[in-house]
Image: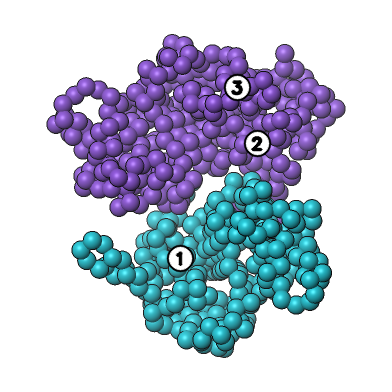
Chain colours: A purple, B cyan
Amino acid sequence: MKEILKLENISVGNEEIKILRNINFIVKEKEIVSIVGESGCGKSMTLRTIINLLPKNLRILNGRIYFENKEITDFKEIEKIRGRKIGMIFQEPSSYLNPLFTIGTQIEEAIKDQIDKEEKRNKIFKILKEMGLSPNVYYQYPHQLSGGMQQRAIIAMAIINNPSLLLADEPTTALDLTTAFGILNLLKNLVLLHNLSIIFVTHDISLARFISNRIIVMYAGMIVEEGDANLVYNNPLHPYTEKLIGCLPEKYKKREKIKVIEGDIPSYRNLPEGCPFYPRCEYKMGICEKNIPGKINFENRIIRCFKYGKIMES
Amino acid sequence: MERLWKVEELSKTYEVKSELKKEKIRVLKNINLEIFKGEIFGLVGESGSGKTTFGKVLLRLIEPDSGKIIYKNIDITNLPEKILRKYRKNFQIIFQDPYKSLNPRLTCGYTIMEGIHEGSKKEKIEKAIELLNLVGIKRENFYKFPHQFSGGERQRIAIARALSTNPEFIVCDEPTSNLDVSIQGQILNLFLELKEKFNLTYLFITHNLKIVKFLADRVGIMFKGEIVEIGKTEEIFENPKHFYTKKLLESKI
């Protein structure tokens, strides 16, 4: 299958801190990849790195990003494809819609092709229908729509230029489960209809399993586990993944005590010298304290943990 | 089992004014419900189904239009606020968004001391520290302000504040839906611990069926302002009768 996006040894930060460390992954055509982790693990930062929308004080320190086999690490290159070939949707739909304009106007604004007004209108009505919205929505303002409908309008905007990659940053967190279910199914359908690939960021690993082909688990700016979604969910190998799944209430009998992850995410100014998960890990060994584990291929998965082999990060 | 709450034919209508017309929206339609002492009652529904309004009307934070609210054996529906205040300390509420529900100008310790009415100042401080300890906030954080805490910690403070009046009943209005899954586990544990310790009764409002299945003894399913199904959690999950309950159970992630 064709590679859509490839991140090669990406590190992000500045002189003082490193937010992302040696991120490597590939997104293939028609694939949904989820990035999972607690708040502050660098999930959203990874998305922002891809489209070069990093905060002012951070920059890409080293590594390369390729989009459809073309390098886009450079700011000028990404300018050309952001919004055209790469779309993005966010967590809180209401804050990304302008309250003063109708949905139709706002989707029209997003169209980059030079086509006449009538064609634009037809295109928008077509996409609204595809999103499961009524044509009336064209003339409505954001406050007249529910959260789920707003999110659908945002998705319409993100894919109106037929992108090949959609970045979704917790698009269902602000919605309740039935609405979220609808949105997730919509995204799944879009993959088939539009030859789309999706990177889906979430903190809920059960959601990730539901929607994606592959799961990437991040911790403190590093990828600690990557593999097939069902495999990772049903048989987590990295201690952190195991813990993440272990705090889901559906994994327990009624009112059984939930095993939570003790401690907090380390601050980026003060990262442990060795494995970042070392202070919270149940299986910690002497080697973990001073050395950062390297990538290991183990049971169809990429994993960073000394439990599965003593390979160190160079 | 002792009955704590009984709600009869409770209704509430909001009036919405748009440019040309006044519209009436019936948020609660003839709700009948009983909550027993010591149980966790889960109220499930999607956004806009009226579940939050019900929680607020029950505690008379919003006045109902018609119907009866009976707390133990007292009809509190039309009780004047002055008399109701005597009972208010027995029921508390924890809101969804801990970023909005804590006063940004009060320190964490003072937030909790506000609810404690007995004893000297020193005793109040002691009691507040004890409560904070109970919810897992360390004593050195007593003089910190809400913005210095994370979302999970703020929700813990909100829980400590709810406990400060020694309540026997707490409305938990989606207390974990703004939190990470890992923090959600901690807060659920805390709710269960406190329930045992203080013999609390919860009305747990949520849209998350997994949490309801994990926590609740009985469940009420709300749909467009009505309770369409009510019963023991296991029975409803195994054998849903109403079409909406079935739809809810189907959207399983």
- Mark 1 vs mark 3, CA separation in Å: 44 Å
Q: List the residue tagged with mark 2.
A: A241
Is residue B239 visible in the rendered structure shown here? no
Is residue B51 visible in the rendered structure shown here? yes
What secondary structure is marked by label 2? helix
- Under mark 3, the amino acid is Val
Front in this rendered view, residue B60 or A286: B60
Is A255 rendered above or below residue B54?
above
Front in this rendered view, residue A216 or B150: B150
- Mark 1 vs mark 2, CA separation in Å: 34 Å
Q: List the residue tagged with mark 3.
A: A12
The residue sitting at 62% across, 23% down in the picture is A13
What secondary structure is marked by label 1? helix
Residue B51 tag number:
1
The residue sitting at 28% across, 43% down in the picture is A101
Q: Chain of mark 3?
A: A
Q: Residues within 10 Å of mark 3 (few under 14, many from 20)?
A: many
